Image: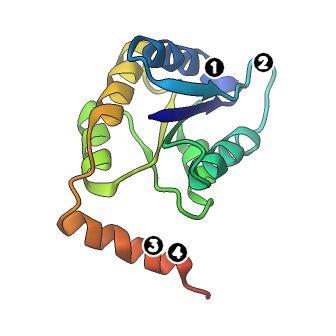
Amino acid sequence: MKVILASDHGGVNIRKEIASLLEELNIQYEDMGCDCEGSVDYPDFGIPAAERVARGEFDKGILVCGTGIGMCISANKVKGIRAALVHDVFSAKMTAEHNDSNVLTMGERVIGPGLAREIAKTWLQAEFQAGRHANRIGKITEYENKTL
């Protein structure tokens, strides 16, 4: 498994915590940053990371900003991305198993580093259950491919 990480200024600490977790789990990753203290725009980091997941360069992405909302909205604008904003372990498991999410977003101003690690580990280790869920994902993909 290959994972891409990115954050804006509001998610630097949790992103670094997740990088540490990935090293512990022996999961290959790339960290796109940001490594700044000044304000930056989350789409400048979230969209390129999501594009790399959509292109198949990475299996999954984990994006962090202050609330996780901006990163989630940005990532979901990329065709082929199913980003989920998660702030609890149960939702992390369900979005992997039922929604086949390929991007996880979290908010550093909402959760602490310990919970963020638990959420990421749960999400990374859960597997899509397919079955009736695959049909639902198919409907989303069909709509996504539709020309309006």
Q: Is residue 116 visible?
A: yes
136 lies left or right of 111: left
Is residue 40 or residue 34 the one in the foreground?
34
Quadrant of residue 8 within the rendered picture: top right
At mark 4, the secondary structure is helix
Label 3, label 2: how many angstroms apart (C-alpha)?
Answer: 36 Å
Residue occupied by mark 4: 144
Report the residue at 30% width, 71% height from top.
136
The CA distance from mark 4 to mark 3 is 5 Å
Going from N to C along the chain, the mark reached first, 3 or 2, is 2
Residue 48, how many percent across, how many down? 71, 45
Amino acid type for the residue under numbered disc 2: Cys
Quarter of the rendering occupied by the C terminus:
bottom right
* Position of residue 132 measured from the top left corner of the image (x, y, whole percent): 18, 68
Q: Nearer the viewer, mark 3 or mark 2?
A: 3
Give the mark nearest the N terminus, 1 or 3.
Answer: 1
Residue occupying image coordinates x 54% and y 44%: 69
Mark 4: which amino acid? Glu
Circle 3: residue type = Thr
Q: Mark 3 points at which residue?
A: 141
Mark 2 sits on what residue? 36
The amino acid type found where label 1 is placed reads Val
